[in-house]
Image (cartoon, grey):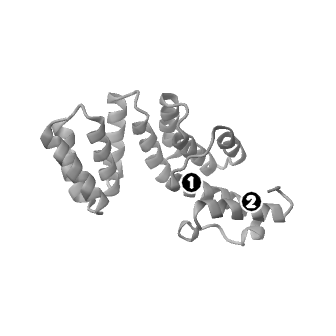
Amino acid sequence: MLVGATALLFRGQKELRAGRPAEAVSALGRAAELSPDSPHAALHHALALADAGQADNALLALELSAQRWPANPVFPLLRGALLAESGRLDEAAAALDAARTASPHNLLAEAYRALVAMRRGEVDAPLRRLAAVGFTDNPRALAALLAEVEAALFRRFGPHTDGKPPCFADQPPAPLLRRLSATRLAALGLARL
């Protein structure tokens, strides 16, 4: 990567951390232009686009990067996560399947693929798969998964899950949330701790 592109990359990353996505898009876009062979610059540019609320541009950038670097699972993984968050579940599933093909043991890709399945109404099979392969330690993915599990519990058991669907902002930290869910099911005689 050229020295100027590296400086722009670092500046763009700093702008992202500071919560200034528009400035990050500018710096990282320029870094990607100066270093078109850098997957790192392309990735951070796409992240900045997403943070700036330019989801369609971020998705396009991730798609083009996935075509340019097909062995790199990060691009389809992030594209799949963005698509899942926007409710485009079929496209998300395809992108996440590509990420899992490129990186079969990627727990984050597994988590987002399970999330897509859960949002389609399948809960048991994705949870069994995650139990078999393992859970990611990514807090954003874990929170989304646990919120889907809680919503499924609410749909299935109604008032025994506090009588209301979970709200992301009200969720306790992931380890506590897992214990609370298991405790609720154990109290109903539906699970053992």
Q: In which quarter of the image is residue 181?
A: bottom right
Q: Quadrant of the C terminus?
A: bottom right
Identify the residue under disc 1: 142
Q: Position of residue 22 (x, y in %)?
A: 23, 58
Q: Which of marks 2 and 1 is nearer the N terminus?
A: 1
Q: Nearer the viewer, residue 134 or 164?
A: 134
Note whether 162 is above or below 71 in the view shown.
below
Q: Contact (CB < 8 A) between labels 2 and 1?
A: no
**Marks 2/1: CA distance?**
15 Å
Q: Residue 25: tell me if it is visible.
A: no
Q: Position of residue 141 (x, y in %)?
A: 53, 52
Question: In the rendered view, does 30 fall on the left or right side of 156?
Answer: left
Which residue reaches farthest left?
A: 4
Identify which residue is drawn at 55% across, 41% down: 107
Q: In which quarter of the image is residue 42?
A: top left
Identify the residue under disc 2: 182
Q: Is the residue marked by circle 2 packed among few (<14), some (14-19), or many (20+) residues within 10 Å?
A: some
Identify which residue is drawn at 54% across, 31% down: 104
Question: Tag 2's secondary structure?
Answer: helix
Identify which residue is drawn at 13% across, 42% down: 4
Q: Mark 2: which amino acid? A: Ala
Q: Where is residue 154 in the image (x, y as percent from the top left)?
A: 71, 63
Identify which residue is drawn at 63% across, 49% down: 118
Question: In the rendered view, does 191 fall on the left or right side of 111?
Answer: right
